[in-house]
Amino acid sequence: MIPHARRVAPTIAVLTAVAAGGLTHSPPAPDGPALTPLPTSDPTLVVATDGDDDAPGTVAAPLATIHRAVELAGPGDVIAVREGVYRLTTNITIDRDGTPDAPITLTSYPGEHAVIDGDGLPASHTPIGGSIPRPERGAIHQEASHWHITDLEIIRGPYGIYCSDCDDNVFANLVTRDNYESGFQLQGESSRNLILDLDSYGNHDPRKNGESADGLAIKEGRGEGNVVRGARLWNNADDGFDAWMFESPITIEDSVAWGNGENRWGFPDFEGDGNGFKLGGGSPAPAVGHQVRNSIAFDNAVDGFEDNGNPGAHRVERSTAYRNGGNGFDLRRSPAVLIGNLAVGNASSVSRGTPSGTGNSWSGGQDWTAADLLSVDPAILTGPRSPDGSVPSSDFLVPADGSPIGARF
């Protein structure tokens, strides 16, 4: 088994004692911003569906809107959102920075589940061919750094989360679903962001007939040190993950993309691309090498892992492509390094340009089939997450003979 990297604990534990007045963050994750301990005094602003925006924002007298809490919050503060559905008429705009030692946190109240519903936003119903003004992009629209946004469900917005020119943020244990553009989009000058344990699905963009709604997009920008870990990206109209026109390396690990690019919405002129992990693109595509480790792409309409014209030197290792409609690995325009990857049941296993590497299933002389795997049932992997927030462990797509290739969860 490939050991998991040390993770950030699920963020019911990020806030350990709101009512008691002591709030602490869990330990730092590697390759991303640290989750820094907060002061022992209670900096919490509480929001509840029966609150009042003229209230002080305590547990006993909560605020009514996340908007008001964001206006009041400063470095070190924690916005804790009580159980319920928060229906937006204007998007939540985050434009104030935290600090490295005192990030601002937006999260569900411990043990409760808060849903942000953007269906009431005008931009959620942009007509076919229309454009969404930049300030209206996202149920949560963020242009700020040093925030931790955790344990929230964001639905039916014009993008779920849209973050541009954002540095040193942690986005953990989020669900972004059924949005009218990508579930989560990071772009612009954005560095050192950690996207951890994201579930993003059903995003679909009627205004473009499915052409650009991805589960997760890090695109149209640049910035060092952005990490995606533990994402599950499924049944989106366009791609699971998209790095279109992003000019800096991105690390993707322990992530899964499936079922992307199918017309589930009856769009008359469907244009979804249907890749699991799209590693670039553009005219011309920036040459940048992304890293993919221990990840799975299955049942996508087109390719599992696709360079999309990006001539950068990607590194893809111990990853699995299964039953995709096109190539398992399409890296023919990249001098990619491919190590220990497994392709089974795709229309074609691999389309290569001048890649190097060793130990891949297509180079060992064996004709791999589903019968060579311990399980082709994804039910555990696609079911509830593990208590620590990670993708649950299973035998899905693991070689029955113990061959050290492909992903392990």
Image (tube, rainbow, N blue to C red):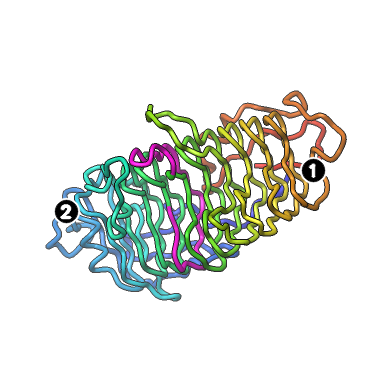
Above-or-below relation of 376 to 167 = above
Q: Is residue 173 left or right of residue 363?
A: left
Q: In this view, does 366 lie to the left or right of 100?
A: right
Residue at left 58%, top 46%? 277
Q: Is residue 84 visible?
A: no
Q: What's the residue at 50%, 38% (across, down)?
A: 234
The question of residue 186 being in magenta is answered with yes
Q: Name the quadrant containing residue 295.
A: top right
The answer to which of 146 and 305 lies nearer the viewer is 305
- Between 271 and 363, the one nearer to me in the picture: 271
Q: Position of residue 67 (x, y in %)?
A: 23, 59
Residue indicated by mark 2: 51
* SS state under label 2: loop
Q: Specify the label residue 360 is tagged with.
A: 1
Residue at horizontal 41%, vertical 55%?
A: 150
Task: Give the residues drawn in magenta, as a range.
Answer: 185-211
Mark 2 Cα shell of 10 Å, populated few (<14), some (14-19), many (≥20): many
Q: Could you give the CA–CA distance between mark 1 and mark 2, rounded to whole angstroms?
A: 57 Å
When the figure is inspected, residue 4 is found, relative to residue 208, above or below; the finding is below
Q: Is residue 277 magenta?
A: no
Measured along the vertical axis of the image, is residue 316 above or below residue 257? below
Amino acid type at circle 1 is Asn
